[in-house]
Amino acid sequence: MSELYASIDLGGTNIKCVFADAEGTVAASDAIPTASHEGPDGVLFRIGSLVERMIERAGIRPRALGMGVPGLVDLKRGVTRFLPNLATQWRDVPVRDILSPRLGCPVYLLNDVRTATLGELVFGHGRRVTSFVFFAIGTGIGGGIVIDGKLRLGPLGAAGELGHQTVIPDGPVCGCGSRGCMETLISGPALSGVGVRLVRSGLAPKLHDIVGGDLNLVTPETMAAAANKGDGKVREEILRAAEYLAIGIGNMITALHPDMVVLGGGVVQMGDLLLNRVRESLRERVHMVPVDDVPIELSLLADQAGALGGIALAMKRGLIED
Amino acid sequence: MSELYASIDLGGTNIKCVFADAEGTVAASDAIPTASHEGPDGVLFRIGSLVERMIERAGIRPRALGMGVPGLVDLKRGVTRFLPNLATQWRDVPVRDILSPRLGCPVYLLNDVRTATLGELVFGHGRRVTSFVFFAIGTGIGGGIVIDGKLRLGPLGAAGELGHQTVIPDGPVCGCGSRGCMETLISGPALSGVGVRLVRSGLAPKLHDIVGGDLNLVTPETMAAAANKGDGKVREEILRAAEYLAIGIGNMITALHPDMVVLGGGVVQMGDLLLNRVRESLRERVHMVPVDDVPIELSLLADQAGALGGIALAMKRGLIED
């Protein structure tokens, strides 16, 4: 049997574990609930048990484990600094030193979206291009920047928070503490909020039908469906969101002239209605580099980006070494 | 005598030539008018004569010459692609192949603001930090990005056009073809335009006095002086400009988490009124990285950045080699 690497994707709801080889071929995967109310000790104990169970089943110990976490980490020491969406916020939890002895292999930590970017670099579009910008557009908007085959991290793994570019100086209040961040305008919740307003105002009859009057079902996907069925106002708002997205993407193209822009996350599943307007708007906004030569592509890994990013992290590929 | 390198800074008005050693100590400098109406052949002939004259005087031939030009270049071939502000626009002029045989040394071409960034990297703040973002704020706003000691160029040397980030989506029309670029809001001309409006509207009595009623003398510097003497509206507009500047700087800090932000160009000579508000505004905008740990510093090279950048380019320092 070939050598395997392990990844842990620590999310707010679930913890996913994958074993894969150096080509990114998944050999095994499993998941457990995060149950973060148990605190770091409880959660890390269950992560250890999860990986041990998979080692037993696979009959092989992984060479290393890469773990993506939702927040800031001390990269060198493998310590979490601040995971805002988990109970207790995991300040200064020595994850590496807790897990590594138990599992008998090296353990590396990295912010989850940077981990996903690493996955795209090693197993996705990064196989073809050496410099790209990655936007993960879901509940929040994260990202990552790859220059000359290396992921830009900064000292805390915090570089690449592309959703917190200012797009409207006096725009909506953002969770980060600023205003008018890209995330306040084109994240899943931002779009859904617009959709709910239109339904409640009686301006989105198709969307109303599609969700059967249940506002819980208003999402970017149902909005795209409604727009395609003739809801003009929904369509207009999606096109406007596309223009905001193009501003954030365009800023990065102008600053970095990457070979490619890669989009991941649920929102970009809205499809051509969104993406065609993004491309059109980029042509209007970006004039300092030949923008048509910078393809805007969907992630090749989709929802596997985090898991495979953890594998890339375990292999220490695409990282600037100390 | 130690080895020398040469630089040419090709501007719209003047051509400056500097000879310096590998420490950036200037041994000789000279300048001639650009007179770009003569076209590339005439201008390049006079550049050749200028350098030859300096070689004769110095009694030493430079090891290489680095040339900063105002526009896009083909880095590998040393050919200008598009210099929008020079007569005939210099499309596909083989500058390297014209100058190099005549001068008997290698000749390298690069965009002028990227060249200035290289100067800051090799001879300025880059001696202390390895990753920084440079903004040159003058008639236009250019910039450069240095990651891990390397200048980010992209295939055309066009990466780093930081003045063309969108700051106000529906803002003023920009020369680049977009709207609301940072350059339309806080370049020298943008600020001067605001100052002229205030003088003409009778809202800037101190500024009116300082320039003796001559609108030709309204500049960021005279505006800063007027604000400090009590022109409240001028002061307000400078603070507002500082907030726009902070948006552009903040986007780059959030995206790249650099060690430092370096500011050059005439506008930043406005001093503390501008810079203190920039720092304050950054604290309001940037929450994803510890922004107080990212110093905002003035260029150490000031108006020598271009000349010394050419020297760094001649030495091929801080560039990603092919």
Image: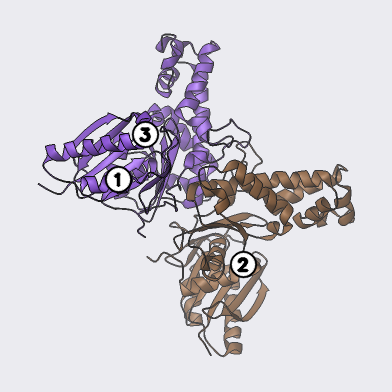
Chain colours: A brown, B purple
Q: Gap in Å between the C-alphas at discs 3 and 2? A: 49 Å
Q: Which residue is mark 1?
A: B98
Position above or below: B199 against A230: above
Q: Gap in Å between the C-alphas at discs 1 and 2? A: 46 Å
Task: Tell us which disc is closer to us: 3 or 2.
Answer: 3
Q: At x 52% / y 55%, what residue is drawn?
A: A160
The one of B80 and A283 positioned closer to us in this rendering: B80
Chain containing mark 2: A
SS assignment at label 3: helix
Mark with earlier residue (3, 1):
3
Whether callout 1 and callout 2 share a subunit is answered: no
Position above or below: A7 against A1: above
Is residue B107 at least partly visible in the picture?
yes
Q: At x 47% / y 35%, what residue is drawn?
A: B278
How dense is the environment of label 3, judged by Cα within 10 Å: few (below 14), some, or many (20 and up)?
A: some
**Residue A312 pos. (x, y %):** 51, 72
Q: Which residue is mark 2?
A: A300
Q: At x 34% / y 51%, what residue is drawn?
A: B129
Looking at the rendered structure, the kind of residue marked 1 is Ile
State the image quarter where residue B292 is shown: top left
Chain containing mark 3: B
Position above or below: B126 against B199: below
**Residue A222 pos. (x, y %):** 80, 56
How dense is the environment of label 1, judged by Cα within 10 Å: few (below 14), some, or many (20 and up)?
A: some
**Residue A223 pos. (x, y %):** 79, 53
How dense is the environment of label 2, judged by Cα within 10 Å: few (below 14), some, or many (20 and up)?
A: some
Looking at the rendered structure, the kind of residue marked 2 is Leu
Looking at the rendered structure, the kind of residue marked 3 is Gly
Q: Which residue is mark 3?
A: B39
Task: Classify residue A192 as left or right of residue B37.
Answer: right
